[in-house]
Amino acid sequence: MSAYSLTGTQFREGVWEGLLRAEVAGAGAPEIVVTLLDQPVTGVMIKDTGEEGRWLLQIPVPLQAVGEGVRTFLILDASSDEVLGSFAIIAGEVLGDDIRAEVDLLRAELDMLKRAFRRHCVETT
């Protein structure tokens, strides 16, 4: 089990940020590895927040990661090789198909609820 936990805080201007917390008292700054398509991402920074056992993790999204499809970044604790977290970038037609499928599913569920509600109203009057 990793000695650290990670909570995503924001994704802005091409930089994903998260808060790393030590789960073990006295743990030093973590060694983090970020991968995209099994390749390491460069430019990852860990900054001290001034609070003991807390660090700001900043991951710049490389230009080659922006494109059609889904790109998933894995954030690993290098000392234990455990996954602390991940984030994904989705763009292009794959996103459109996914949203249309979700809307269709929501419409079907709404129609089912309307029928059940109408049936309930008829039965209780």
Image (cartoon, rainbow, N blue to C red):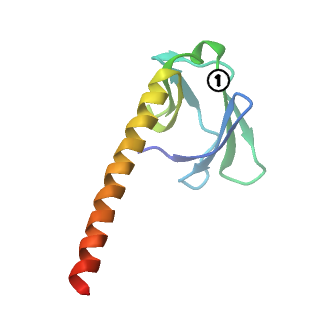
- Say how many tags the image has: 1
Of residue 77 and residue 15, the one placed in the foreground of this image is 15
Q: Is residue 77 visible?
A: no
In the rendered image, residue 74, in percent from the top left (x then y), is placed at: 49, 29
Residue lying furthest right in this view?
A: 50
What residue is drawn where x is 55% and y is 17%? 40
| Quadrant of the image containing the C terminus | bottom left
User: Label 1 sits on what residue type?
Assistant: Val
In the rendered image, residue 60, in percent from the top left (x then y), is placed at: 68, 25
Of residue 29 and residue 59, the one placed in the foreground of this image is 59
Q: Is residue 104 above or below residue 39?
A: below
Figure quadrant of residue 45:
top right
In the rendered image, residue 98, in percent from the top left (x then y), is placed at: 42, 33
What residue is pinned by disc 1? 61
What residue is drawn where x is 61% and y is 52%? 26
What residue is drawn where x is 60% and y is 50%? 21
Residue lying furthest top in this view?
A: 64
Residue lying furthest bottom in this view?
A: 125
Of residue 6 and residue 95, the one placed in the foreground of this image is 95
What residue is drawn where x is 32% and y is 50%? 108
Q: Is residue 36 left or right of residue 21?
A: left
Q: Is residue 49 visible?
A: yes
| Quadrant of the image containing the N terminus | top left
Callout 1 crowding tier (Cα within 10 Å): few <14, some 14–19, many ≥20: many
